[in-house]
Image (cartoon, grey):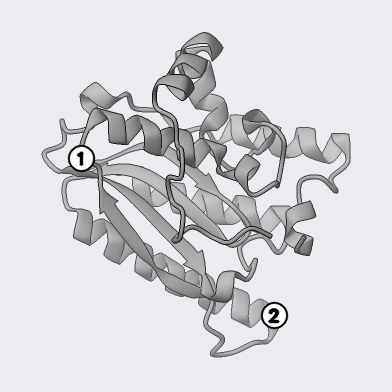
Amino acid sequence: MHRAGYLWRKLTPKQREGWLAWRRRNRRPWHTPPHRFGIGGAEYHITAACFEHRPHIGLSPDRLSVFCAGLLSLADHDGIQLSAWCVMPNHYHLLVAAADGKAFVRELGRFHGRQSCEWNRQELTPGRQVFHGCMEREIRSDRHHWATLNYIHHNPVHHRYTDCWTEWPWSSAGEYLEQVGRKNALRIWREYPIGEYGKGWDAPEF
């Protein structure tokens, strides 16, 4: 397993509580499906990965948190509704409705550029390619929405970063579970299974 896979598992209980507290301080509102088309646009599952799946985002928990804050700030604007998100050491997922999806993806590209320049400056690696672009898929139905949401929140477990959704601070899973309750979340998980969702295009197993 790549060393980044130990990022969460290697933290002490005190450190873990600190990062979970970060999530509570920086929570974003969670939007339910009936409202996702109210902004006059479409809903997308956006995926972006680091070049060659290297863990540039997850160099440290601090970097992960700063990256998350910057990423979420892009979605904290009129015309954008964020339903689910998850950031991992080498890639991230967003479930977002946007009045202008192409404009939002362009903003993500500029954000990637700023982060790349800053990290290359910090690590003395000028010109290094950090990100490998991003990909958006339009959500076609409520079933597609819920399967995507389950997939995003389950991703840290799928990649063996943690054993439980709520343990991974860098996602909206904790807020989602608080909003819908564990009973409803379990029902949604069973009713909208992820199956082989994402097979062949998500980050590889470590």
What residue is at 49 percent from the left and 18 percent from the top?
A: 185
Q: Looking at this view, is 55 or 23 the one in front?
A: 55
Q: How many marks?
A: 2
Badge 1 element: loop
Residue 123's tag is 2
Most distant residue in the bottom direction: 127
| Residue 42 at x, y percent in the picture | 18, 43
Q: CA distance from mark 2 to mark 1?
A: 41 Å
User: In the image, 118: left or right of 197?
Assistant: right
Q: Looking at this view, is 73 or 157 the one in front?
A: 157
Quadrant location of the N terminus in the rendered image: bottom right
Q: Amino acid at mark 1?
A: Arg
Please say if 91 is above or below 87.
Answer: below
What residue is at 52 percent from the left and 45 percent from the top?
A: 86
Residue 140's tag is 1
Most distant residue in the front direction: 196
What residue is at 14 percent from the left and 43 percent from the top?
A: 41
Mark 2 vs mark 1, foreground winner is 1
Please say if 88 is above or below 26.
Answer: below
